[in-house]
Amino acid sequence: MARPSILYVIPAMGGPAPEYALPRLHRCGDVHALLSAPPTPAHERHLRQWCRSVRVLDADAKMPGDLVTAAREVGARAVVAFSEFAIAAVAEACQELGLHGPGPNITFSRDKVAMRQAWRERGLPVPDFVPVRTLGDLQYADGVLRRPYLLKPSWMAGSQGQVLVGTGTDLGEAWRRATADIADTDRQGLHDFLPAGRGARFIAENLIEASAPSWYEADGFGDYVSVEGLVAAGRYHPLCVTARLPTIPPFVELSFHQPTVMAPELQRRIEEHVRAGVDCLGLEYSATHTEIKLQRDQGLCLIENNARLPGAMIPRLMEEAFGLNLIELHVRSLLGEDLDLPGRMLTESPRPGAVAMLMLLPTDSRGRPWQSRPAFRPELVDWSSLVSPGTEVEVVPGLTRPSGSPIPDFSPSGGTRNYLGTVFVRAADPLTLRDDCYRITDGFEAELRRHP
């Protein structure tokens, strides 16, 4: 039987590292890569190894029309994208092609305003919010919300372009910073494939009053988690919880951890809240990454749902901790194959140890920017000097800047553009893993300085 053709749409940012994603896609069929920008030499090597064809979209590509044309040219039976920037265009292309995809309700998992409105109408917990398209809208929101509140793009990804409006913040300056960040990302090609998702589209929202202690017996963990899942034929399957260390202020993610040390019965409460949130968004075939805030007295508040694979290398964590190959499950679902999915979300790992993806940032774990600019030479770092005996640290090449790259100033609104790289960390248990991730974050600057 001929192997199915798979069109893999790759934007300039987002999705798992190619060295991880491509071999797993290849197990499901012949991969045809369609990129929004030329690949780096390191990425090109993996693309040539695993793909039947590789093509770069024209700068003025029409969406979703050019995706439809590319899919027909290769006879694609599935069109996949693992980045938020492409998922809405892929959904529209799949509808035109008659293929399984996220479906016509994709906007509810892409536009944060539409998402919040859907959840509020169902009585699900969300923060108060106001759509913002102009400075006048922001001034109106300022009279409705309580400071400090967050102004963030409603179609962006990676925590980029977020501005915290505090007690003394000038609204004109906040609007200038937010729109300037969006213009900057747009120049870099970091925007949605669909024109409807570009430009000054924001949401202003009250900060969620979050608190982790009632959810964990151990301290040092962040005040929100995500649930990774899959929607197949309109049915949602939550798979596992991903824990975190606290974000770098204001909201730059630092690490992802599996399995969580949270009690199984508390994970079940999260599972049911997230199920209600995903079910009302009307997805058809999609991986899901749903974020939810932990509150005092074991309260919960939904943050957002993404109709895609979880970011960074969370799919690898799922495979290492729970034996779940989410890429393969998702693609085989798109191809109409039967899936072997757990009946309920997995709350305990059947495997020993614990794993994390840790982002390397030019700050310490409290968000204090580095005071020096050492040479970025991750290949020279003695990782064993930063972690407990037996803990393993592995640099993820596809998510790490080239050796010798300049280290940028930390930008609170820069989101994932602040990342120097990503490391995979494996430890004997979740608490040792937590401690070692703090040690790496707080000791990385000094360790780099040892290798001028």
Image (cartoon, rainbow, N blue to C red):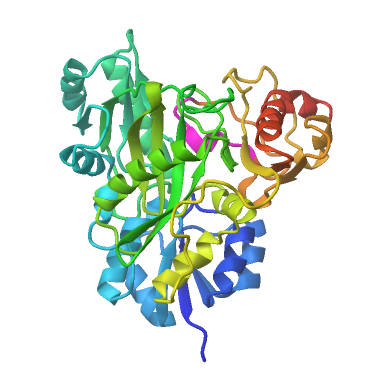
In this picture, residue 360 sits left or right of residue 324: right
Q: Residue at x 63, y 22 (%)?
A: 364
Q: Position of residue 436 (x, y in %)?
A: 71, 31
Q: Position of residue 195 (x, y in %)?
A: 27, 52
Q: Considering depth in this image, is 165 or 34 the residue closer to the camera? A: 165
Q: Is residue 400 above or below residue 55?
A: above
107 within the magenta span: no
Residue 110 visible somewhere in the drawing: no
Residue 374 visible somewhere in the drawing: yes
Magenta segment boundaries in residue numbering: 412-421
Q: Is residue 409 above or below residue 96?
A: above
- Image quarter (top left, top right, bottom left or bottom right) of the C terminus: top right
In this picture, residue 34 sits left or right of residue 123: right
Q: Position of residue 411 (x, y in %)?
A: 50, 26
419 within the magenta span: yes
Q: Residue at x 58, y 74 (%)?
A: 27
